């Protein structure tokens, strides 16, 4: 049994290490897809159309303006997820029960005793865990309101960057849908009998860009729908898996505001207003209002 357990632990460790290495490759893959798409849309197909001086030039102008706007928002959201810490547990954090009971030295107690009192404790990090906090084996630490570890962004998705991740999905879906629709006539032309202008390289790039963007649009749409349902219920992927999906559900409006804030000017950009950051503790990942009758169901 001990040998089997040791082998399993070693395999998990190697898997987590592999995920870290894979993440860096995935960032390069994202940039590669963006580069191929940019070449196909701007350089090959719609950029030259600006000089046509007819209706086609107007269409090309509209497509290019929308394409560049969505691309800028996509990359802004993407790198905000990559470079924003999802939220770690402050060393000074103590649960509210400390103040109520006058406890000042909970860390000297045994983990079993703490958990019996309803106080969450991470046995890997050896510290107390705030509500909705989970340990990430890839990052090797506890993450506030952890949703999942995403290899595409080489980071955990948690309390402090979940909004940015949702905006990344949103703008990725809009951008890939725009590219798919824009290149659809060119893709259909591949299967017609008429001669298609362009070199073999540009034609291959257009074909590849269409297929890639169509695949990403369909896959991202599924993730986007899933996360919209999670936000509407004020839950995370982990909590949904653990079937803890009701405690923090305060109604769709308040659930939405706990992720995106109350200032409408910031809803579609990867940032928060200073007012929201000051007034809403949930945006910092340590305190969450919950239904009183369900407070005792989770620890």
Image (cartoon, rainbow, N blue to C red):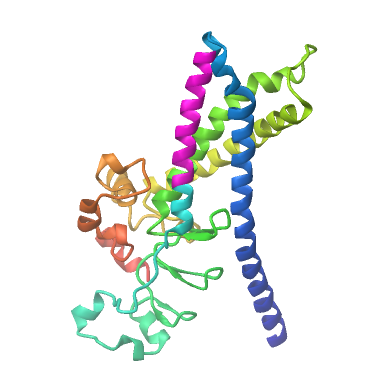
Q: Please indicate, yes or no, whether residue 136 appears anywhere in the rendered image.
A: yes
199, 144: nearer the viewer = 199
Residue stretch rendered in magenta on the structure: 57-76
Report whether 134 appears left or right of 45.
left
Number of marks drawn: 0
Q: Residue at image x 29%, y 58%?
A: 282
Q: Residue at image x 53%, y 19%?
A: 60
- The image shows residue 137, relative to residue 203, as above or below, that is below
The x, y position of residue 143, in whole percent, is 43, 67
The image quarter containing residue 119 is bottom left
Look at the image and tell me in which quarter the N terminus lies.
Answer: bottom right
Q: Please indicate, yes or no, whether residue 213 appears anywhere in the rendered image.
A: no
Farthest residue, direction right: 193
The x, y position of residue 169, in whole percent, is 49, 43
- The image shows residue 274, relative to residue 64, as above or below, that is below
The image quarter containing residue 116 is bottom left
- The image shows residue 62, relative to residue 154, as above or below, that is above
Q: Residue at image x 29%, y 77%?
A: 94
176, 285: nearer the viewer = 176
Q: Residue at image x 40%, y 69%?
A: 88
Report whether 272 appears left or right of 148.
left
195, 173: nearer the viewer = 195
Farthest residue, direction front: 51
The x, y position of residue 23, in whole percent, is 60, 59
Residue 64 covered by magenta stretch: yes
Look at the image and tell me in which quarter the C terminus lies.
Answer: bottom left
Farthest residue, direction bottom: 108
Residue 183 covered by magenta stretch: no
Q: Main secondary structure of the magenta part?
A: helix
6, 19: nearer the viewer = 19
The x, y position of residue 129, in whole percent, is 38, 74
- The image shows residue 250, relative to residue 286, as above or below, that is above
């Amino acid at each position: 049994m001990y040998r089997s357990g040791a082998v399993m632990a070693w395999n998990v460790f190697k898997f987590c290490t592999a995920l870290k290495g894979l993440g860096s490759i995935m960032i390069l893959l994202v940039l590669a897809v963006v580069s191929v798409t940019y070449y196909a849309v701007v350089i090959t197909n719609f950029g030259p159309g600006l000089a046509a001086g007819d209706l086609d030039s107007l269409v090309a102008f509209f497509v290019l303006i929308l394409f560049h706007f969505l691309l800028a928002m996509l990359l802004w959201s993407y790198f905000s997820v990559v470079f924003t810490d999802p939220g770690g547990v402050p060393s000074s954090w103590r649960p509210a029960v400390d103040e109520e009971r006058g406890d000042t030295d909970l860390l000297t107690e045994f983990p079993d005793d703490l958990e019996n009192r309803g106080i969450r404790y991470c046995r890997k990090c050896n510290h107390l865990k705030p509500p909705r906090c989970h340990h990430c084996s890839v990052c090797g630490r506890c993450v506030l309101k952890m949703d999942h570890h995403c290899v595409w962004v080489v980071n955990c998705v948690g309390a402090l960057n979940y909004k940015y991740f949702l905006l990344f999905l949103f703008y990725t879906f809009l951008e890939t849908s725009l590219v798919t629709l824009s290149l659809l006539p060119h893709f259909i032309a591949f299967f017609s009998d008429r001669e298609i202008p362009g070199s073999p390289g540009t034609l291959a790039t257009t074909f590849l860009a269409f297929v890639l963007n169509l695949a990403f649009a369909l896959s991202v749409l599924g993730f986007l729908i899933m996360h919209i349902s999670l936000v509407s219920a004020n839950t995370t992927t982990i909590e949904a898996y653990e079937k803890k999906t009701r405690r923090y559900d305060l109604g769709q409006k308040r659930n939405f505001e706990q992720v995106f804030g109350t200032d409408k000017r910031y809803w579609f950009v990867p940032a928060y207003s200073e007012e929201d950051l000051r007034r809403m503790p949930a945006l910092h990942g340590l305190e969450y209002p919950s239904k009183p009758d369900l407070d005792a169901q989770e620890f």
